[in-house]
Image (cartoon, grey):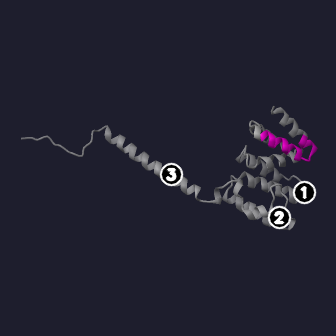
């Protein structure tokens, strides 16, 4: 006599792929969570301008002022910062300011650093105040692409009323007459 073969652990064919997909989804979500937590816990090497090394802050102010005898050390600290966090637009801007401060003129290296700062973060509220001040202070020397980037950043920030007050204050701080006029005209066009 033939008996039908009964396998108690056998699930219907359509349930097995669904269970496998669910198990893989849970596993993938767990792995993504662990990776995200390890990335966030990895510390300052992945942070932006808000956590720039204090030693660098002590050597290079956000406007680029530096003691000439400390310029080499400051440059080394900025370069080390950029090795750890190459997308740190604030560090790129600090490098540009240091170049201008030590050379006395707006150098090609300063231009490249400002362009890199804008390439990595076209709009960054954390550095916008001093990046815009720096660019408009050197308005005659910056390239048309840097001018366009500064204009786009101002337009993006000018959408919010709080930022318009900041822009009005910033305009009064720009010493270069050409940069101040360009800033004023652009700010007026924001409405």
The residue at the far left in this view is 1
| Label annotation for residue 71 | 2
Chain-order first, disc 1 or disc 3: 3
Observer able to see residue 128 = yes
Which residues make up the magenta segment?
A: 163-180
Picture residue at 58% right of the left edge, 55% below the top:
40
State which mark lies toward you, 2 or 3. 3
As for residue 38 lying within the magenta part, the answer is no
Specify the label residue 33 is tagged with.
Answer: 3
Alpha-carbon span between mark 1 and mark 3:
49 Å
Residue on which the image places disc 1: 104
In the picture, the quarter occupied by the C terminus is top right
Q: Per the image, is 168 magenta?
A: yes
Distance of label 1 from label 2 (alpha carbons) = 13 Å
Q: Earlier in the sequence, mark 2 or mark 3?
A: 3
Q: Secondary structure at mark 1?
A: loop
Q: Calculate the distance from the C-alpha at mark 2 to the C-alpha at mark 3.
A: 42 Å
Element type at mark 2: helix
- Is mark 1 in CB contact (under 8 Å) with mark 3? no
- Graded by Cα atoms within 10 Å as few (under 14), some (14 to 19) or many (20 or more), the crowding at tag 3 reads few
Observer-nearest residue: 147 or 183? 183
């Amino acid at each position: 006599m033939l008996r039908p073969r009964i396998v108690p652990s056998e699930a219907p064919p359509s349930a097995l792929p669904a269970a496998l997909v669910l198990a893989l989804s849970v596993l993938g979500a767990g792995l993504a969570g662990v990776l995200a937590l390890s990335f966030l816990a990895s510390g300052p090497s992945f942070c932006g301008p808000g956590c720039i090394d204090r030693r660098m802050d002590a050597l290079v102010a956000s406007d680029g002022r530096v003691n000439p005898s400390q310029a080499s050390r400051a440059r080394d600290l900025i370069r080390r910062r950029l090795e750890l966090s190459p997308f740190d637009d604030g560090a790129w801007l600090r490098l540009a300011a240091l170049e201008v401060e030590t050379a006395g003129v707006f150098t090609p290296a300063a231009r490249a650093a400002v362009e890199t700062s804008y390439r990595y973060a076209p709009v960054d509220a954390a550095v916008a105040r001093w990046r815009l001040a720096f660019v408009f202070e050197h308005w005659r020397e910056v390239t048309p692409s840097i001018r366009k980037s500064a204009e786009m950043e101002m337009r993006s920030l000018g959408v919010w009323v709080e930022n318009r007050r900041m822009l009005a204050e910033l305009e009064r701080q720009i010493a270069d007459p050409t940069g101040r006029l360009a800033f004023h005209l652009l700010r007026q066009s924001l409405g």
